[in-house]
Image (cartoon, helix red, strand yellow):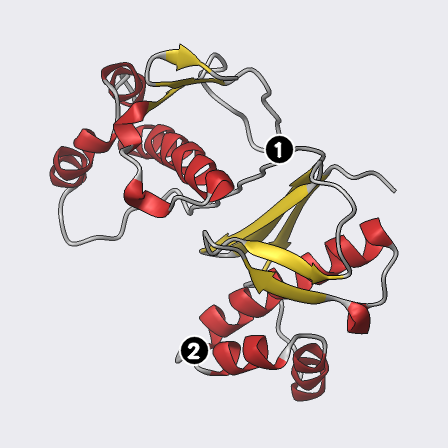
Amino acid sequence: MTRSLRWAFNVRAWKPTREEWLCALQCVQPEEKERINKFVFTKDAKASMIGRLLLRKCISEIMDVPYDELRFGRDENNRPVVTRPEIPDHSFDFNVSHQGDFAVLAADEYPRVGVDVMKTEYSGGKTIREFFAVMQRQFTTSEWNFIEQPGTESELLRRFYRLWCLKESYVKAIGSGLSISLQRLDFNCLTREVKEGAITKDTQLYFDGKLLA
């Protein structure tokens, strides 16, 4: 099976019966089950559950290991890792994220993989302009120029969240959380608009002014 995966699961569309939910709980580790059961809102519990199940399905299929023989833990940077069985090399990595209606997984033959997902809507108490004024300091000048291209508010938000997801994906990949200054990351989106269902592979990443990818 390919070791390069991109999965998205519509959490909102999943309406498990009680039996299905209990079955799902049996597929995760006790500490994961305990954490999932602490969520106040059903949608958050479902999203967390799907994230764990996506991880198990990914590793089970790629490594050909039964679900009940898999064990996950966290590394020193709080990234999910397989603790059993041992992955024989460090050329494979995976990451999950969930927000809004979707849970997503990315896995690939790279030492570090990060993924993020955001609903491209703003529901905060501020106006879009007030929100942007607060968030602008997280972006480089060129990134902000990309966001502020002429367009509707929804188009500006899509560009904003596109860059935000890229930054989040990077910090999740290296496991630094938000301790790293996001202005050190400068993403250049050569494909200016991404249509629904399309894939773009030409985004450039500069770190402290040096081209990384």
Q: Is 113 placed left or right of 208 in the picture?
A: right
> In which quarter of the view is residue 147 placed?
top left
The dot on residue 39 is 2
Residue 135: give x, y in percent of width and height: 20, 37
Label 1: element kind = loop
Res. 13 in view: no
Q: Residues within 10 Å of mark 2 (few under 14, many from 20)?
A: few
Residue 125: give x, y in percent of width and height: 15, 54
Q: What residue is drawn where x is 62% and y is 55%? A: 81
Amino acid carrying label 1: it is Gly
Label 2: element kind = loop
Q: Tag count in the figure?
A: 2
The dot on residue 197 is 1
Q: What residue is drawn where x is 46% and y is 69%? A: 44
Figure check: 186 above or below 44: above
Mark with earlier residue (2, 1): 2
Residue 194: give x, y in percent of width and height: 51, 24
Q: Considering depth in this image, is 115 or 211 the residue closer to the camera? A: 211
